[in-house]
Image (cartoon, rainbow, N blue to C red):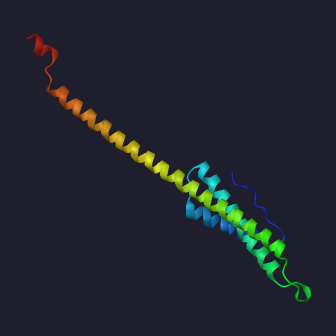
Amino acid sequence: MQRKPNILEGESLEEFNALSESLRSQFEPATETERSLVDMMIHHEWFMRRALRMQQTLSASGPGGAEPDTKRLNVVARYYKTHERAYAQTKRELESMRKHKRRMDAMSEREEAASKSRQRQWEQILKKMPTLNQWVN
């Protein structure tokens, strides 16, 4: 289920939707869990972009050439880093889950091939064994 975007005044829903489509296209989520992780990545990326816009606004000198508010800039920097780490962690989780699935699929394919091989071996053995009638006669 896609989260409702948190769009503030001055932000663009179209830009959010473009980001959303871009990441969905890039990661192509195949399951509900993958869709949820990609949704989380979309929101973390959106919040990082928001932090960058806030930083640009705060970095501009204030009225009369006043110095930027370093306290707020530090808060915005922490906000950015928090979402940057969360994005990276979510991406690692998605990649790890996909790697595990590929490994399990490969293991299942190997087991299926081994099972078919054992089945063929037993069929060959049974063909060579004498039937009950041959033992009696």
Q: Position of residue 13 (x, y in %)?
A: 76, 68
Q: Position of residue 45 (x, y in %)?
A: 68, 66
Up/down of 31 relative to 89, above or below: above
Find residue 46 and report its image quarter. bottom right
Quadrant of the drawing holding the C terminus? top left
Q: Residue furthest top?
A: 136
On the image, which quarter does residue 12 sit in?
bottom right
In the image, taking residue 102 as reference, residue 68 lies left or right, namely right
Q: Residue at x 49, y 49 (%)?
A: 100
Q: Residue furthest left?
A: 137
- Please report the residue visible at 67 percent of the width from the left and 62 percent of the height from the top: 42
Classify residue 25 by image quadrant: bottom right
Task: Identify which residue, 23 or 51, lies in the foreground.
Answer: 51
**Side (left or right) of 18 relative to 74:** left
- Name the one closer to the observer, 87 or 31: 87
Residue at 88% from the left image edge and 85% from the top image edge: 66
